[in-house]
Image (cartoon, rainbow, N blue to C red):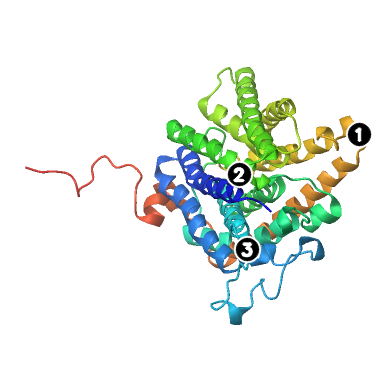
Amino acid sequence: MYSDSATAFLIICSAMVLFMTPGLAFFYGGLVRASSVVSMMMMSFGSIALVGTLWVVYGYAMSFGQAGSSGFFGLDGVFGVDVKKLFVEDVFKVAQSGNGLDLVVAGFQGTFAIITVALISGAIADRARFGAWMVFAGLWATLVYFPIAGWVFNFTTTKGVVTDGGWLVYNVGLLDFAGGTVVEIASGAAALAVALVVGKRFGFAKGMHAPHNVPLTLIGAGILWFGWFGFNAGSALAADGTATLAFVNTMAAPVGGLLAWSIYERITIAKPTAVGAASGAIAGLVAITPACGFLTPMWSLVLGALAGGICAAAVELKWKFGFDDSLDVVGIHLVGGLVGTLFIGLVGEHVGLLQTGSWLQLGRQAIGAFSIGIYSFVMALLIAWLIQKTIGFRVTNTDEIAGVDLMVHGEQAYSEADPRWTWRP
């Protein structure tokens, strides 16, 4: 059986991953206009509240309600819930082990659900209505995230051994250590769909808005990097050798990404930027997420460098194809997630093409990645379209120009003079 130390380890990792969502709020908040900071950060904090609630009520039951190999959607009953027993019997039904490991795994997985939904919000910065975003977040979490989490993460830990996985793992053979498909590809694909439905910002053009607070973005990137150690190492479910490998790889890949993105900017625009450096680190972290348990540190460094360069180039695609992904969720999370997931099929220990001479694992990785990406894109497109056609997803051009903070939340991030505190003689 897992020891009490594994439970303590995962409690710490869960807190680190939850801290990532406020970190994301800082990261995104620094990148938007000064008149949109409150709105941007509220979408992250709104995700914490709403998705956290849904996870407790029925999300965990949907994702882990039955053995992952035996059902495409991983559902038990109606949304995994026996309504008659909802307030009588614990929906989780996971506090059976003496050391509480199963229960803390439930909490750990809940933090993944929260940040995945929050990631999508960066694609619609500066123009989204908060109420519409919350409706989208709840529907997408229910119809997309909770099922696909079951497709990959629905493992069992009976007698301390992981014996099963969701159908993409158990039946297809996908390798995804910490959620490169479930978290990164799913959120990136959904971000593309929502950006297409909501439409472009007023005056959409390259260089239209510079980040209003670069230090805030760097603080957010630092918090995300810190939390990512818990995200990846914690996915080992124990403080063991696999966790330490994931930990080291979570250091190696982002430093490679940071350097590669900075070099890319030095070549293309002659000036490596701080925002570019932070974005490169995030790209490396995204790419290593699925691969952190299957690569050596040297290959992780290579993967991070590849992801940094590829993602830096990918963020330019929105200008070429004309979709307004405000904060480059598609270019970093979708593309970075694909790079990291497919890289396992090339150089993964004992399974990659370079070691085995077989394309089999690369094919499995591609099936898993594109199954989740396509499902998330189609569902997000449908959900966002329905919201746009009913209650409306975006604010008016007038409100967008005036600033969504004041128009939607009645607040400002910065004020030269607050009358409540201004002393007059």
**Residue in the image at 41% along x and 56% along y:** 408
Residue 254 sits in quarter: top right
Residue 268 in percent (x, y) is at 63, 21
The residue to which callout 1 is attached is: 356
Q: In the figure, 177 relative to 56: above or below? A: above
Q: CA distance from mark 3 to mark 2?
A: 18 Å
**Residue matched to label 2:** 231
Say whether residue 336 is visible: no
Secondary-structure class at tag 3: helix
Towards the viewer: 290 or 132: 290
Within 10 angstroms of label 3, few (less than 14), some, or many (20 or more) residues? Answer: many
Q: Is residue 95 above or below residue 192?
A: below
| Residue at figure coordinates x 62%, y 68% from the top left | 93
Residue 122 vs residue 114, the one in the foreground: 114
- Residue 353 spot, x, y in % from top left: 88, 34
| For marks 1 and 2 on the same chain, the one whose residue lies earlier in the sequence | 2
> Callout 1: 10 Å neighbours few (<14), some, many (20+)?
some
N-terminal label among 3 and 1: 3
Inspect the image, locate mark 1, and give the three-letter code of the amino acid beneath it: Thr
Which residue does the numbered mark 3 point to in the structure image? 60
Q: Residue furthest bottom?
A: 84
The secondary structure type at the circle numbered 2 is: helix
- Mark 3 and mark 2 lie on one chain; the one further toward the N terminus is 3
**Residue 416 point in image, percent of width and height:** 26, 39
Nearest to the observer: residue 103 or residue 315: 103
Q: Which kind of residue does numbered mark 3 sit on?
A: Tyr
